[in-house]
Amino acid sequence: MTDRLFVPLNKAWYNLFAAGKKKWEIRAYGPRFNEKTVEVGKKVELRNGYQKKGALWGTITEVRIIDSIYRIPEEVTKELFPISNFDLLWSEIYKYEDKYNKFIVFKVAIDDSR
């Protein structure tokens, strides 16, 4: 097991983490993202795709496992999808909900030493 969780993000989500607006990430539950690989206290490396430059480092502070995106608490949703374009938001939600049946949602505290 590695000492950090590597999480590639698309540019929009990466920029929201970098700006301090996005604090939670969601992934399909499976071999790469589960209770053993995503745990409180674990270091996280967030990258814009697979680019080597500009990695954001943080620590997982909360973890939730859910069976539907619609069961994410509202306070988590606001920091998971911090966007005002509701059409984009719902398109992302539908895409995930239709594709997977279990999710892991985790909060990342970005290190101040970036």
Image (spheres, rainbow, N blue to C red):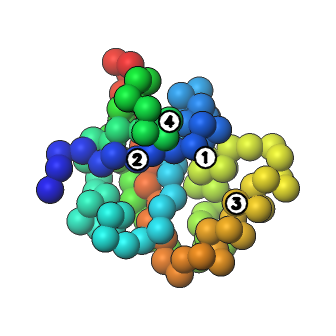
Q: Earlier in the sequence, mark 1 or mark 2?
A: 2
Establish if 31 lies above or below 77: below
Helix, strand or loop for disc 1: helix
Question: Could you tell me the amino acid type at mark 4?
Answer: Asn
Q: Nearer the viewer, residue 51 or 101?
A: 51
Establish if 109 lies above or below 76: above
Number of the label disc, if any, that sits on residue 22: none
> Residue drawn 34% across and 18% down?
113
Q: Which residue is mark 4?
A: 48
Question: Could you tell me the amino acid type at mark 1?
Answer: Glu
Q: Say few, some or many: other residues with alpha carbon within 10 Å of mark 4 (under 14 / 14 to 19 / 20 or more).
A: some
Number of the label disc, if any, that sits on residue 7: 2
Distance between the alpha carbons at the discs numbered 1 and 3: 15 Å
> Residue drawn 34% across and 46% down?
6
Nearest to the eye among marks 1 and 2: give it.
2
Q: Say few, some or many: other residues with alpha carbon within 10 Å of mark 3 (under 14 / 14 to 19 / 20 or more).
A: few
Tag 1–tag 4 contact (CB < 8 Å): no
Distance between the alpha carbons at the discs numbered 1 and 4: 18 Å
Tag 1–tag 2 contact (CB < 8 Å): no
Q: Earlier in the sequence, mark 3 or mark 4?
A: 4
Q: Considering the image in quadrants, where does the N terminus appear?
A: bottom left
Distance between the alpha carbons at the discs numbered 3 and 2: 18 Å
Q: Quadrant of residue 114?
A: top left
Distance between the alpha carbons at the discs numbered 1 and 2: 17 Å
Q: Which residue is mark 3?
A: 92
Residue 34 image position (x, y, % from top left) = 33, 68
Q: Say few, some or many: other residues with alpha carbon within 10 Å of mark 1 (under 14 / 14 to 19 / 20 or more).
A: some
Question: Could you tell me the amino acid type at mark 2?
Answer: Val
Q: Quadrant of residue 89?
A: bottom right
